[in-house]
């Protein structure tokens, strides 16, 4: 099925979300610490857990915790430096340095994902986002998003409502219950990719064994949806098995048989006390499957992220109407520019809508998709839904 309309969402669409107490908002690339340091997760105990991260930032940027509370700090620069130092340590065979840098990366990633998961709980404060689910369903649109959060998925679930079906009982999920979903729309079938391990949505207190992907997608009712939500930078509910132990010297085995397998979680294993990476039953570390904001991103492999980018090119190249909302085409994100230039090389969209208070973004989008007419410009989602 070819989607007539494709929505491209960036972090800007979430800025109307805020928590009820402190008016905290989803972070942009430079204000994660300014936001998170106002939350109790980074109280004295939380800051102590991230002591190595704060020491690292002080060593190379001379920003104290107090500075980070007030001043913008570039996450892309920090993640990129960590990435390059880890690669260099690996090339030098310096296992101790590599592990130290990896742990700091874990802490920064955990802070980012934990804060995002917290602020996502308040997505109902943004009435404009509540309309997104209805619009996507009504238009049978494909969605490309650079956001890690699952706000779009939640909006669609709210639009379709819950099922009357009772959840599977605790333990191994029988074959006849593999298609269960709490909602009439199943996230596990919506991402345009297949996962090696799927955790079926479960109610509080009910523990269901994970289902291997081959078995889950082998069920006749578990075909992937024809119009996908493509998470181009990964997602809060995606995790990857590693061969790193939470306590490296405490275990004999050095190889995780599931290493590299990607897990679709039913919730957020990282929403918990502490900032260490989540671990599975054998104490192997599960790494959040997100493309952190580094300058050099690996987006072309055979994994779920690479598959998502290739599918995104296909969806863009065949769409007639393109809506770009809350994304500003940052100059360092060449992968997205390449995606647009290649997707629209043969045929630009018939209609282009930019949802962004900056009119320069509309011109950039038009340039990248070879759109020669005047794009429609809407300042925000509220205005877009009033005058689509």
Image (cartoon, grey):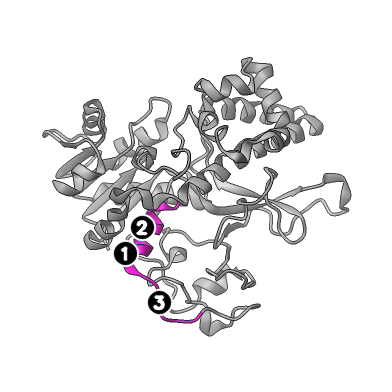
User: Which residue is most to the top?
Assistant: 62
Which residue: 67% across, 42% down?
Answer: 275
Tell me the magenta residue range.
149-166
Which residue was labeled with disc 3?
163
Q: For numbered disc 3, what is the local secondary structure?
A: loop
Which residue was labeled with disc 2?
155
Which residue was labeled with disc 1?
159
Q: CA distance from mark 1 to mark 3?
A: 12 Å
Label drawn at residue 380: none
Tag 3: Cα neighbours inside 10 Å, few (<14), some, or many (≥20)?
A: few
Determine whether, in the image, residue 44 is placed left or right of residue 198.
right
22 falls in the magenta region: no
Q: CA distance from mark 2 to mark 1?
A: 6 Å
Quarter location, residue 374: top left
Task: State the image coordinates of residue 329 (x, y, percent, origin top left).
Answer: 34, 31
Task: State the image coordinates of residue 321 (x, y, percent, origin top left).
Answer: 19, 48
Tag 2: Cα neighbours inside 10 Å, few (<14), some, or many (≥20)?
A: many
- Looking at the rendered structure, the number of numbered marks drawn on it comes to 3
């Amino acid at each position: 099925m070819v989607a007539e309309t494709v929505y491209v969402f960036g972090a800007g669409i979430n800025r109307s979300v805020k928590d009820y107490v402190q008016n905290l908002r989803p972070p942009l690339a430079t204000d994660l610490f300014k936001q998170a340091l106002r939350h109790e997760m980074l109280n004295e105990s939380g800051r102590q857990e991230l002591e190595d991260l704060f020491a690292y930032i002080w060593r190379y940027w001379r920003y104290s915790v107090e500075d980070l509370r007030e001043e913008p700090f570039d996450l892309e620069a920090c993640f990129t430096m960590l990435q390059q130092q880890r690669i260099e340590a690996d090339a030098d065979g310096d296992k101790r340095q590599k592990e130290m840098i990896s742990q700091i990366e874990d802490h920064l990633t955990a802070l980012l994902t934990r804060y995002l998961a917290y602020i996502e709980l308040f997505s109902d404060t943004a009435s404009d986002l509540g309309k997104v689910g209805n619009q996507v369903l009504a238009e049978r649109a494909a969605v490309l998003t650079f956001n890690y959060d699952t706000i779009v998925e939640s909006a669609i679930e709210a639009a379709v409502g819950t099922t009357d079906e009772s959840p599977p009982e605790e333990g191994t999920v029988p074959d006849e219950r593999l298609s269960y979903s709490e909602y009439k729309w199943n996230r596990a079938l919506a991402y345009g990719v297949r996962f090696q391990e799927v955790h079926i949505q479960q109610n509080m207190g009910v523990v269901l064994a994970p289902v291997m992907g081959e078995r889950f997608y082998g069920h006749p009712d578990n075909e992937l949806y024809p119009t996908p939500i493509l998470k181009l930078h990964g997602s809060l509910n995606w995790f990857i098995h590693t061969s790193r132990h939470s306590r490296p010297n405490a275990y004999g085995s050095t190889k995780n048989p599931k290493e590299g397998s990607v897990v679709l979680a039913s919730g957020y294993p990282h929403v918990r006390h502490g900032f260490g990476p989540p671990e599975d039953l054998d104490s192997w570390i599960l790494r959040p499957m997100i493309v952190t904001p580094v300058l050099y991103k690996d987006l072309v492999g055979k994994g779920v992220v690479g598959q998502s980018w290739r599918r995104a090119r296909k969806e863009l190249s065949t769409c007639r109407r393109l809506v770009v909302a809350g994304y500003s085409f940052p100059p360092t994100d060449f992968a997205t520019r390449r995606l647009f230039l290649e997707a629209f090389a043969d045929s630009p969209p018939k209609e282009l809508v930019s949802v962004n208070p900056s009119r320069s973004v509309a011109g950039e989008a038009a340039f990248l998709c070879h759109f020669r007419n005047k794009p429609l410009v809407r300042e925000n989602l509220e205005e877009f839904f009033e005058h689509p």
